[in-house]
Amino acid sequence: MQGVLRIFIGFSVIAGLLLFIYVINTPKEVKTSFAKKFPMVTDVYWERESIDEWEAEFSIQNIEYSANFLDDGIWVETEHKIAFHEITLVAKNALTKEFSNYKVELVELLETLNISAYEIQISKDSKSIEVLISLEGLLLSNLKE
C-alpha cells in the first residue's frame, strides 16, 4: 500500500512540475508582441488559453484587460469590461429589439484584427446567452451558455 502511495505522490509531483513549466514558460515572441502592443503595461499575468494560445491579464488605468496571442506572437484579441451606457446607441437598439425581455449581466468590448464588437451576456429566467453585436449594431452571433 505504501508503495502505491509513493508512486501516486511521485506522479503527482512530476505532473504538477510539468504543468507549472507548461504554464509559466510564455514564449519570447508572445512577450515581445505584448510589449509592442501594450508598452505602458508592466504587470502581466500569463496563462495558457489553449495548446497554441496565451492569455495576458493586466490593468490599464484600473480597468481589467485580457489579450490573447498565438505561440508565434500573433495578436488574436483584446477585451475589457465596459458599462452598458458606454455602448453605441445603434448597438443598444439592436440588443433591445432582439432581446427586449433580457437583463444585461456583463458587457465587454472585444477587439480583433478584423472587428470591434460588444460581447454582451444577457439572461432571462434561468437562460443565459452571450451576444456579439458590432459597434454598428449588427447582431453577429448569440451563443447559449
Image (cartoon, helix red, strand yellow):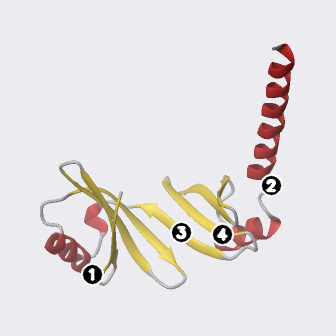
Q: Which residue is mark 4?
A: 69
The answer to which quarter of the image holds residue 132 is bottom left
Residue 145 locus on image (x, y percent): 36, 56
| Above or below, comparing residue 16 to residue 32 in the picture | above
The answer to which quarter of the image holds residue 142 is bottom left
Residue 47 locus on image (x, y percent): 66, 53
Query: Which is more toward the observer, 70 or 83?
Result: 70
Q: Does label 1 or label 3 sit earlier along the sequence?
A: 3
Helix, strand or loop at mark 4: strand
Query: Which is more toward the observer, 127 or 86?
Result: 127
**Residue type beneath disc 3:** Thr
Q: Which residue is mark 1?
A: 137
From the viewer's perspective, is 92 left or right of 135?
A: left
Q: Which residue is mark 3?
A: 78
Mark 4 crowd level (few <14, some 14–19, many ≥20, 10 Å Cα): many
From the viewer's perspective, is 25 left or right of 60?
A: right
State yes or no: discs 2 and 1 in contact (Cβ < 8 Å): no
Helix, strand or loop at mark 2: loop
Q: Residue at x 45, y 71 (%)?
A: 110
From the viewer's perspective, is 118 left or right of 59?
A: left
Helix, strand or loop at mark 3: strand
Helix, strand or loop at mark 1: loop
State yes or no: discs 4 and 3 in contact (Cβ < 8 Å): no
Q: CA distance from mark 3 to mark 2?
A: 21 Å
Q: Which residue is mark 2?
A: 25
